[in-house]
Image (spheres, rainbow, N blue to C red):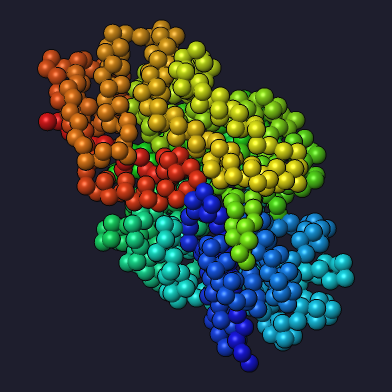
């Protein structure tokens, strides 16, 4: 029998740069397992970029066309499926991924509306995909024959005679039956692109958060790949990576299990040998802070912490979540901040969850700030298909008001079968509830911008550490800045007004309304050109960062006022603030430009000694030097190389500078300094 052509795609939008700039790991697992089990029957190809898929479709059509389905790529995947089915209805189309309802009635409605999908695979795809393909082979790839017989296929559902046919649900008991896509070589081509490698060491999550697709009971079992395989994969990546400094570990609770310690030791060895990765993205588990600390001691470049989502007990109860204890949280953050190599800490907060409000959101931010978290990643609550929070019952119980918008960076005009097609991904976000008004929602978003701009990633850590030494919460300074608009320069005021407009302009009552608006020819070109539909938080953070003198003036004026309002201003503090402002400007203004330039200036304080104290200095405890000290500010060679890699990586993103400022460790980018 002639081998069937099976194409598996995990597409990313590319019109505004590479939106999902990672390796297609999930799809590669399905592909490599199918390759192993069906090698005598199928030729399998893997796609990431729309242009590559379009080119191949112009040359030939596959027998089976498959797509990963996430909120950020469903519409582009469906457009390809629809056009291929119109060209040849006999091509079998298969979708799989978490962006799918869990309710039986909603599943049927979804598939009846999206008729270009022949089969949908839920949960894990590897076993189901092979089971489905074998069934197709047995039935000579005749879709109608399978549906007529109502064949029950593992983890797979489809519509037959207006009814939903659903096969048995099964998790893989031993994930080591799946070959490594890296060691197989199926991912080799992606090392040639500005993409971040991803690796999975465990699969599954024991928690049940209602806002998360991985909170389903069917995903509670945790499985692990063999240590030897993980080690081989990590070395395989390190030997082949080109001008990329990042690695993502996709585990949902990394460092929560004892088996993560050997993995960390392997990464430690690789970092020593290959100087890679410099930045590690991994979600830390919340239940084993001491083990997390142990792992963090071994590897560099991992921003540790614990996701909070909220610190309010009523909010946590509403989303079926329990946080790490305050004591354990403080231990974890303190360790991260005091570890060698400028290790940093991070937490996540979601705005708009059930029972959340302005004050509770501010409380969550204050909690993170007062516990010395270096970066607070703030997200809007999104109604993800397939989560409990998206159910009708949840919406009614908490009065959740949602609106629809285009996902930033996830749209464009794509040439398919030699014709241009406008495509956009739409998401549903919560903008108010019975505890959060629309006005309060907007106030919280503005506060999020201030935290992102002035607090996160150590941009002004020297000021905030000084405030802590003076027993003043840095949150008080952030709140003062937000509430005292008369301090804003004309340019800063314009940026904040623009942020406010962008936060509210791109919202629509229905999916259809949002989709119709963005897909009109004139409008989508504005989106692609960056005039509309951007990630407003990252864009305006970048714009504010480029106004460094202005934001520096704003934070120093606000700091001065907060200290005066506390009645503790002294000449020592005034003198210190004067020097500190020049010091911060020389270190951090325009750090991506003229990286070979050396700047020198004299100061009345020994900032090398102050750095040793991690800038937690009460200016009243030190005095001006009798003789000033001259410092030089410069980038080291390894910094220049790292900056080049990060700029190249994020120049392919819709909001490149904003993404770089958020994702990079800015300590590796800000200028070094030393006495002359």
Residue 436, horizontal then vertical, whole percent: 69, 29
Query: Would residue 418 be seen by someone viewing this image from the given angle?
Result: yes
Front residue of this view, candidates 177 and 553: 553
Residue 393, horizontal then vertical, whole percent: 80, 44
Residue 252 image-quadrant placement: bottom right
Q: Residue at x 51, y 58 (%)?
A: 251
Q: Is residue 136 left or right of residue 648?
A: right
Residue 584 image-quadrant placement: top left
Residue 102's place in the image compared with 353, above or below, is: below
Residue 99's place in the image compared with 457, above or below, is: below
Residue 112's place in the image compared with 496, above or below, is: below
Q: Residue at x 74, y 57 (%)?
A: 102
Residue 651, horizontal then vertical, whole percent: 42, 47
Front residue of this view, candidates 622 and 402: 402
Q: Is residue 133 left or right of residue 244?
A: right
Residue 623, horizontal then vertical, whole percent: 21, 15
Q: Residue at x 74, y 66 (%)?
A: 116
Q: Residue at x 65, y 46 (%)?
A: 521
């Amino acid at each position: 029998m002639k081998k069937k052509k099976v194409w598996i795609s995990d597409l990313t939008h590319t019109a505004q740069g590479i939106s999902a700039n990672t390796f297609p790991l999930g799809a590669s697992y399905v592909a490599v397992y199918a390759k192993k089990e069906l090698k005598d029957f199928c030729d399998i190809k893997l796609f990431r970029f729309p242009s590559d898929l379009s080119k191949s479709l112009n040359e030939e059509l596959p027998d089976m066309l498959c797509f990963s389905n996430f909120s950020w790529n469903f519409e582009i995947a469906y457009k390809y499926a629809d056009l291929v089915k119109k060209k040849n209805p006999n091509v079998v189309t298969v979708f799989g991924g978490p962006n799918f309802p869990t309710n039986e009635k909603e599943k049927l409605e979804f598939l009846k509306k999206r008729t270009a999908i022949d089969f949908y695979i839920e949960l894990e795809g590897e076993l189901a995909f092979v089971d489905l393909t074998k069934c197709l082979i047995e039935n000579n790839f005749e879709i109608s024959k399978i549906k007529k017989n109502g064949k029950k296929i593992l983890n797979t559902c489809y519509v037959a005679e207006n009814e939903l046919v659903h096969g048995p649900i099964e998790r893989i008991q031993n994930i080591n039956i799946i070959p490594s896509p890296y060691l197989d070589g199926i991912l080799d081509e992606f090392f040639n692109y500005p993409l971040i490698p991803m690796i999975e060491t465990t699969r599954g999550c024991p928690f049940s958060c209602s806002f998360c697709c991985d909170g389903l009971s069917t995903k509670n079992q945790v499985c692990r790949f063999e240590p030897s395989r993980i080690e081989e994969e990590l070395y395989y990546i390190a030997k082949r990576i080109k001008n990329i400094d990042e690695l993502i570990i996709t585990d949902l609770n990394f460092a929560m299990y004892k088996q993560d310690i050997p993995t960390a030791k392997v990464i430690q060895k690789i970092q020593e040998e290959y100087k890679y990765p410099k930045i590690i993205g991994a979600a830390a588990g919340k239940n084993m802070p001491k083990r997390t600390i142990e792992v963090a001691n071994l590897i560099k470049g991992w921003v540790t912490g614990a996701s909070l989502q909220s610190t309010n007990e009523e909010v946590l109860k509403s989303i079926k979540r329990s946080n790490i204890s305050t004591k354990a949280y403080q231990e974890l953050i303190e360790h991260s901040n005091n570890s060698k190599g400028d290790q940093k800490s991070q937490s996540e907060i979601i705005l708009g969850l059930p029972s959340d409000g302005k004050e509770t959101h501010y409380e969550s931010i204050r909690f993170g700030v007062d516990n010395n978290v270096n970066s607070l990643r703030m997200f809007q609550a999104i109604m993800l298909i397939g989560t409990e929070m998206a159910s009708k019952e949840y919406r009614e119980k908490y009065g959740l008001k949602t609106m629809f918008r285009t996902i930033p960076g996830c749209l464009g005009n794509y040439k398919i079968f030699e014709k241009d097609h406008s495509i956009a991904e739409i998401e549903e976000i919560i903008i108010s509830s019975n505890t959060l008004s629309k006005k309060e929602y907007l106030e919280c978003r503005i506060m999020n911008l201030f935290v992102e701009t002035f607090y996160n990633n150590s941009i002004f850590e020297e000021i905030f550490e000084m405030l802590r030494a003076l027993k003043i919460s840095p949150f008080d300074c952030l709140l003062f800045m937000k509430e005292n608009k008369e301090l804003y320069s004309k340019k800063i005021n314009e940026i904040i007004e623009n942020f406010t407009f962008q936060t509210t302009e791109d919202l629509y009552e229905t999916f259809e309304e949002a989709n119709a608006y963005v897909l009109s020819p004139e409008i989508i070109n504005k989106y692609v050109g960056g005039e509309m539909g951007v990630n407003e938080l990252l864009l305006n953070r970048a714009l504010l960062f480029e106004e460094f003198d202005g934001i520096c003036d704003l934070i120093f004026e606000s700091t001065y006022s907060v200290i005066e309002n506390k009645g503790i201003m002294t000449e020592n503090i005034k003198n210190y603030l004067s020097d500190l402002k020049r010091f911060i400007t020389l270190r951090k203004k325009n750090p991506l430009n003229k990286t070979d330039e050396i700047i020198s200036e004299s100061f009345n304080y020994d900032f090398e000694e102050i750095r040793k104290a991690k800038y937690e200095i009460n200016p009243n405890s030190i005095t001006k030097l009798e003789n000033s000290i001259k410092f030089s500010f410069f980038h080291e060679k390894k910094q220049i190389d790292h900056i080049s890699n990060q700029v190249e990586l994020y120049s392919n993103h819709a909001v490149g500078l904003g993404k770089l400022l958020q994702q990079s460790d800015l300590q590796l980018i800000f200028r070094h300094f030393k006495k002359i």
